[in-house]
Structure formats: structure tokens, C-alpha cells
Image (cartoon, helix red, strand yellow):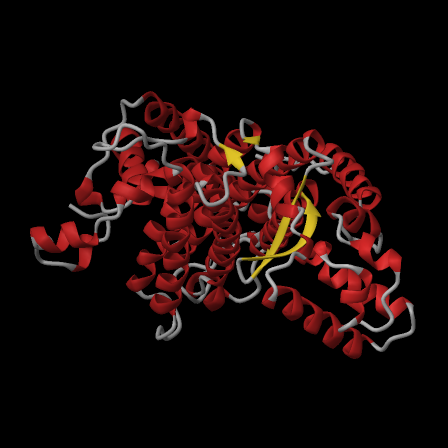
Amino acid sequence: MALWSGRFSKGADQLAAQFTASIDYDKRLYAHDIQGSIAHVTMLAKAGIIPKADATAIVRELRSIRQRIEAGTFKFRAELEDIHMNIEAALIEKLGDTGARVHTGRSRNDQVNTDVRLYLRDECDAIGALLAELQRAFVSLARANQDLILPGLTHLQNAQPVLLAHHLLAYVEMFDRDRDRLVDCQRRLNRCPLGAGALAGSTLPLDREFVARKLGFDGALRNSMDAVSDRDFIIEFLADLSIVAVHSSRLAEDLVLWVSQRFKYVELDDAFCTGSSLMPQKKNPDIAELVRGKAGRVVGSLVGLLTVVKGLPLTYNRDLQEDKEGLFDAIDTVKLTLALLAPMLRTATFNRQVMEDAASDPALMATDLAEWLVKQGVPFRQAHHQVGRFVAWCGQRKLALDQVTLEQMRETVPLAKAEALGLFNARRSVNARTTLGGTAPEQVAKQLKFWETRLRSKTPKPRRA
């Protein structure tokens, strides 16, 4: 029988009980639920609300329950609905009325919100560490291929030559912002709801600030109705994970393109590819494709929870039980994605000749000619127009930009000089882009040094247990 059954004349319909049970997925909160309960009963004893001997017995048994869960000997019961009731029922079964004191001064409404905050606080650290390891993989790959040139793309068309290291370090920047977002999210969610009760607080002399300190929170949430009813901290966390997943997906798309026969820029290790059930010759980038596909799954979890919460009146509604399955799935998906991407990058090998040949197309240096004209005093818009006409002139005659004579160039670029004919060199073009954050080797070397130093010092630190 449910622990809340006193008001009811009969048990729940079997399908209704199955429909409302969440133990299959929320049992992963067991450690945080026990952590919160230990802090809560310690406070109850300190405040004189329950006998100290009872609190000692409850804490001892809670630790025993944790050991049994981790040993796989604890029997979860679906009829008890969730992790909170399973643990409380086990306490009562062992300790009788002493165990029944554990829920004094709290509701499952504030209890579950505390559990999830504790859980996400740890997950912010864990995902931050995975992001840092992925960043290190990027930096290592960039260092190993520091001088390799490839075409940078816009609109999926060759645009300008860039260093591969510069391209890789762009992702390091993205994933660093992802880490910062998680740190910021962690700071905001690190407030304790416990003691808010169902919605209105308690008539008992609860010391909520003591519990908050005991659990490593930065303080107690100020408003009891807000404490039990909002899930904005989960929404924020899922938004952060969605951005991580989108950044991962963009990387995956680069890899899928680069391994294709159209590009042939990179070879992924066999450990991160699969074959075809029909075509023996195939080596497919399935891991990268699934990284790309699973981003939609993570974004779906965010949209799902936004949709659940959007129409809920204050305060708690059972709809909020639906905050967890998508959350847990998003966490598992992102963690596995990040754990796979780092070794996949570290074992990738690049086809230097193919990449540099593609970057050597003189059309990629058209902007260099326009900027050379600017240095001669030509307004940029006029320079752009002249070079555009020059590109069209060459295209009509099926000539590469570096195959024309000075006289031919002057038909569309009147101020052209002999030195303009030497602009169509990818290495020269890359070397010339020395502005802050540019792709010139000296700038990329600074970026590499910055990230190697930062990733040595900016190691995520685990929070207090």
C-alpha cells in the first residue's frame, strides 16, 4: 500500500499505478536522495524535532540502503512509485516508527527538487570534465597538424585557405563556452529547496539554512512556492546540453563531409566506423552520423520540458514528473557523445596532399587581390567589383586566376602590377592574415599556446560531496 494511502478507501487501479510509477528511471537519484535525507534528519535532531537516537538510527540505515542498492541486493518495488517512497518504505520496514520520522517537515515536492539539483550539480562537473578532455583532443590534433592548409568554406563552397589548426581551434572556443555555460548553470541551480514542504513551508522549526550548508548549497531558496514548482534550472541545463549537442553535430558534419570521396581529407580509425551489410567495400562514418542525429534527441528533451511547464499553474503539478526521462536521456546521450568524440579525433589522420591541393585553387585568393587593391588606395567596393569582373573574365575563358598575364589582368583590374600576379599562393595568403584571431601561423601559435595553458589550469573541480 502506498505511504500516502490514509485518505483513500482502496488502492490504485493497476494501470493507474503503472502509469504513475517512475522508479524505473528515477532510481538513479538514490545516492542524492539518501544524501538529502541524511542532511534533513540531522537537522531534525539538531532542532529537537526528532530524538537524536532516532536520527542516528535513520542515518545508519540510509547508508545501509545505499550499500544494498550499489551491491544490487535492494529490491525496488513499482507499487511504491518512486525512489523516495522505495527508500522510505525500506526505512520503515527496518526501523518501524523510527523510520517513519524521516519525512517529518518535508514533501516529495521539495525532496525531488533537492535530489535533482544535487544530481545536476554533479553532472555539470562530469560533463565539464568530458568537454575539457575533448578540447584537449582538439588542441593535440591542432598541434600535430599545425602547418596543414585546407580550404575554409562558406555556403559549403571553397572560400579562403586556412590552417587546419585554426579550424580545429574554432571548436575549442565553442566547447569552452559550453563549459562556461554549465558552470553558470551550476551556480544558479545551487540553491536548496528542502524544507519548503508541499508549497507553503512548515509549522515546525526547520533550519533550512543548516540543511543547505550541509548539502553544499549556496543557500536556501527564498520562496517556498517557487522552490517546489519551477523547473527552470532543468530547462537551462537542457538548453546548455542542447548547445553542446549542436556543436558536436556540427563537428560530426565536418567529419562526415571530410571522409567522403568528394573530399578525402581525413581517415577515421576503423574503431569509429562501421561497414555495410551488403557492400563489402564500405567504411561508413556511422559514429559521426549518430552524433549528428542524436543532437535532435537532446534538443527534443529541451522542447519537451518547455512544453510540459508552459501551462502549469503554481505550484506543483504531477506533470512535473515528466521532467526526468528526457533529462536523463539527454545527459546519457551527451556524455556518451563527448566520450566518443575525443578518441575519434585523436586517432584521425589527415590527407595532407589532398587538402593542400584543394586549398591551392587560385580562386580562393581572390579576396587577397581585392585587399591588395585597397592597399593601393582603391575603395574596397570598387576593388571588390574589379576583382569580381576579373574572376568572371577568367571563367569565360576557362583560365585559372594565376594563368593570366599582367596585361590580361589589367583589362579588368587597371591598377594591377606584377606583384599582383604572385598573390595566388595559399601559403602566402594564410601567412598574411595576421590580424588578431586570424589564420596566420603566428596567430594560430598564440591560440595553441593559450589553450594548452588554459586547459592545464582550467580543470573542472568536483564539488563537495
Residue in the image at 74% along x and 63% along y: 367
Is residue 244 something one can see in this rendering? yes
Q: Where does residue 139 sit, x and y in percent of width and height? A: 68, 35
Q: Is residue 212 left or right of residue 322?
A: right
Q: Is residue 112 left or right of residue 428?
A: left
The quarter holding residue 71 reads top left
Residue 385, placed above or below residue 365: below
Is residue 96 something one can see in this rendering? no
How many marks on residues?
0
Residue in the image at 65% along x and 64% along y: 394
Q: Where does residue 238 sit, x and y in percent of width and height? A: 47, 55
Q: Where does residue 200 sit, x and y in percent of width and height? A: 44, 67
User: Which residue occupies the foreground of this view, 375 or 178?
Assistant: 375
User: Which residue occupies the foreground of this view, 402 or 365?
Assistant: 402
The quarter holding residue 449 reads top right
Residue in the image at 67% along x and 56% along y: 364
Which quadrant, please, contains the N terminus? top left
Q: Is residue 159 left or right of residue 267?
A: right
Which quadrant, please, contains the C terminus? top right
Q: Where does residue 40 sit, x and y in percent of width and height? A: 48, 44
User: Which residue occupies the foreground of this view, 145 or 410?
Assistant: 410
